[in-house]
Amino acid sequence: TLNGTLSKLNSTEQELQDVSTTLNGTLSELQETKTELTETQNELEEKDTKLLRTENELNSTKDNLQEVSKTLNHTRSLLEEARGLEKVSRWDVLLTPPYLNRIFTRQLYDQLNNSWDMLEKFIGVNVTRGFVEHFREEHDIEEH
């Protein structure tokens, strides 16, 4: 019985040593996993930071693109306006609403004639956009 108990004790001691070895191996693996987790978390933080920077750059680029688009549209509009002015003819006035697709009456003729006669008072004046705008605002022919 003493031999049996001693044998059992030795067996239990061996099992305890095996469990201890397994536990130490598991602790070692756990420590490695913990280290890998920390590294992964650091990499994730770096990637989040880069992502935020990229997102900010993207938003800035979108804002710049919108501004450039507005400028481009304005420039296109000015270009179209300038192209239209290249080919202005004294007859283009007939393309305006008071005349276009309407019967040319004596009244329309007189209004047109009076408009040109009014310019006689301004002989010697520099014709600027402001000069033209003045006539457009103050002396425009009423649409019928």
Image (cartoon, helix red, strand yellow):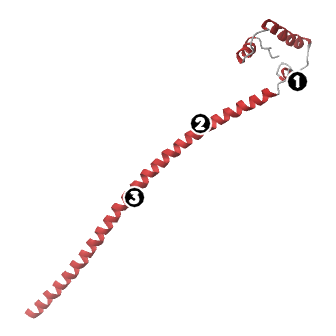
- The residue at which mark 3 appears reads as 43
- The residue at which mark 2 appears reads as 67
Residue 74 horizontal/vertical position (percent): 67, 32
- The mark tally for this picture is 3
Q: Quadrant of the C terminus?
A: top right
Residue 32 vertical position relative to residue 92 in the rendered view, above or below: below
Secondary structure of the residue carrying tag 2 is helix
Q: Which residue is depicted at the point 91% across and 14% down?
A: 105
For this rendering, which residue is in front, 101 or 44?
Answer: 44
Type of amino acid at the residue the image marks with label 1: Asn
Type of amino acid at the residue the image marks with label 3: Glu
Q: Which residue is depicted at the point 49% across and 47% down?
A: 55
Does residue 58 appear left or right of residue 41 in this picture? right
Q: Which residue is depicted at the point 13% across and 91% down?
A: 7
Residue 109 horizontal/vertical position (percent): 89, 13
Does residue 10 appear left or right of residue 109 in this picture? left
Type of amino acid at the residue the image marks with label 2: Glu
> Which comes before the other along the chain, label 3 or label 1?
3
Label placed on residue 101: 1
Instruction: Count neighbours of disc 1 (C-alpha within 10 A) and say few if under 14, some if 14 to 19, many if 20 or more.
Output: few
Secondary structure of the residue carrying tag 3 is helix
Answer with the quarter of the image where residue 14 lies.
Answer: bottom left
Q: Quadrant of the N terminus?
A: bottom left
Answer with the quarter of the image where residue 118 lies.
Answer: top right
Residue 35 horizontal/vertical position (percent): 31, 64
Does residue 142 appear left or right of residue 53 in this picture? right
Answer yes or no: is residue 63 visible: yes
* Whole-number angstrom distance, CA of label 3 to CA of label 2: 36 Å
> Which comes before the other along the chain, label 2 or label 1?
2
> Which comes before the other along the chain, label 3 or label 2?
3
Mark 3 vs 2: CB contact within 8 A? no
